[in-house]
Amino acid sequence: MLALLVVLSLILISASFGGSGGGPLHTVQSGFLDVLSPVETGAGKALTPVHDLFNWVGDVFHAASQRDKFRKELSAADKKIVALQAQQSSSTDAARLQHIDTTLRLSSAATVDASVISQPESLWVSHVTINAGSGAGVSVNDPVIDPDGLIGTITEVAADSAIVTLINDPASGVAARDSASREIGLIVPQPGSPGELQLLDVSQPGEVKLGDLVVTAGERATAGATLFPANILIGQVSAVASAADPLGTITVTPAADLTSLESVQVLTGGPGS
Amino acid sequence: MSDTTNVTLRLAVLAFVSVLVQIAGVAQVRILGVNADLAPLVVAAAGFLTGALPGALFGFGVGIFVDLAFAETLGISALVYVLVGYGAGRVRELRAPEAPFTPLALGAAATAVASVGYAVLEFALGVTAPVSLLLVRDILITIALNSLIAVPVYSLVRRWLIPALPEDPRRRRRRAYTTGGLSPLSRS
């Protein structure tokens, strides 16, 4: 009996598979479908809520897996964007430093490019660490600039790193000149305001105007102090001396953002080294 | 009406209803991209309860129904379910398993045989679908889904067929013990 059923099945398969589309088996099959299709349609409509419920459950799982996938893709894209932005920023900084070097007529052999590896930890800390040291030719008293202007002086040197004391440090003093009036003075930190500088000892404070650019004078501020090359931008005059101020205090906003330094350049071959 | 006629009628009704439920209900609900498949469960349960040859005949009938209803190549499902029904009946005749998980294992095995057998026959007939992990995944999910519903399906089939089946001597003996009539304990 089993063999008979198997043989019968095989005959049916052969007949159905090899037969033309209009054979008797296909006629039977299509007739059966004609009978069943209304039942199927009706049942499909009746079971639509159940169907939707299961689909909803499936969609939830599908959406969850898609969400995880897209999160990973987003994370990867973010990393790429960060890397590209860092690359772009680095290129921009390098180009601006190159421009400063050209302006100051500094040879590439007299400069060391470096990155800041330790930022000031608070508003009242005024030194940073860079990733270039004596191994790269960096020495104490070397001036340090960033793409925006002067930032400070090397005060300690190790083999592969160095500490830069920023121009807003209380111990700092830079001989400066108002680029418009050619008045000379001394740039020191503004007491009580670490983000600002003061231009002191100006012989004619009234000549200094709001918005004037302040640059290095190319002179030593005191004996033994760093000799900065002339005409490096320090900042811009943000407040001038009032008539009532006997000291003639002039406030200067640093050109460089001293709280967020990235790429810097040490002027190793300059007169200050 | 004789027992044989009664069983035949019940099997015919069971085949028709199960295929109808499959078409109208179960096939409409997809879980994880596949449907549960009542046919192998019902064929295996019927074969297990009625024996190898009735199981094979029932499988043939259900297979023809399925092939007609789903417009498949006529005979493929029939051949597969003949083997499933016969195999389930032979398991009962040779091993007579009574473990509680027997319906579940029977359903899983029947689904596996039916799914793999169907795929093999389709490939033998030249269907050019690639053998992919997707196919394996679908077969495994179908087996898992069918395993979940195997026990209730077996219970329903058993409840439908039992009144028409000749009484199982082991069942009769167990009932006698519980009612006290023939229990050796009742004599002591």
Image (cartoon, coloured by chain):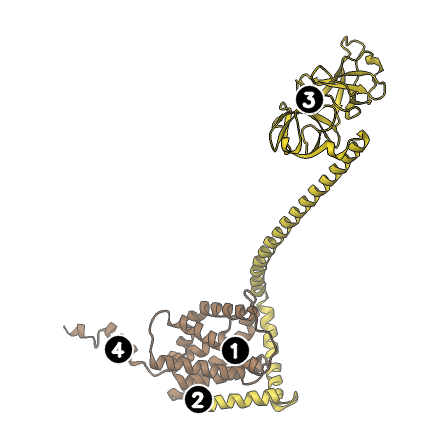
Chain colours: A yellow, B brown
Tell me if residue B38 comes above or below residue A206 in the rendering.
below
Circle 2 marks a residue in which chain? Answer: A
Residue A75 visible here: yes
Which element carries disc 1, helix, strand or loop?
helix
State the residue lying farthest toward the left: B188
Circle 4 marks a residue in which chain? Answer: B
Q: Point out which mark residue B170 bears.
A: none
Q: Point out which mark residue A168 bears.
A: 3
In front of the other: label 3 or label 4?
A: 3
Marks 1 and 2 sit apart, C-alpha to C-alpha, by 22 Å
In front of the other: label 1 or label 3?
A: 3
Marks 3 and 2 sit apart, C-alpha to C-alpha, by 100 Å
**Picture coordinates of residue B45, whole percent (x, y):** 42, 77
Circle 3 marks a residue in which chain? Answer: A
Marks 3 and 4 sit apart, C-alpha to C-alpha, by 103 Å
Task: Name the one closer to the observer, A143 or A109.
Answer: A109
Q: Point out which mark residue A2 bears.
A: 2
For this view, does B6 lie left or right of residue B174? right
Circle 1 marks a residue in which chain? Answer: B
Marks 2 and 4 sit apart, C-alpha to C-alpha, by 32 Å
Task: Report the label total.
Answer: 4
What residue is pinned by disc 1? Answer: B19
For this view, does A158 lie left or right of residue A86? left
Asked if labels 2 and 3 touch by Cβ distance under 8 angstroms, the answer is no
What residue is pinned by disc 4? Answer: B173
Tell me if residue B116 comes above or below residue A27 in the rendering.
above
Identify the image quadrant of residue A28. Answer: bottom right
Nearest to N terminus: mark 3 or mark 2: 2
Nearest to N terminus: mark 4 or mark 1: 1
Which element carries disc 3, helix, strand or loop?
loop
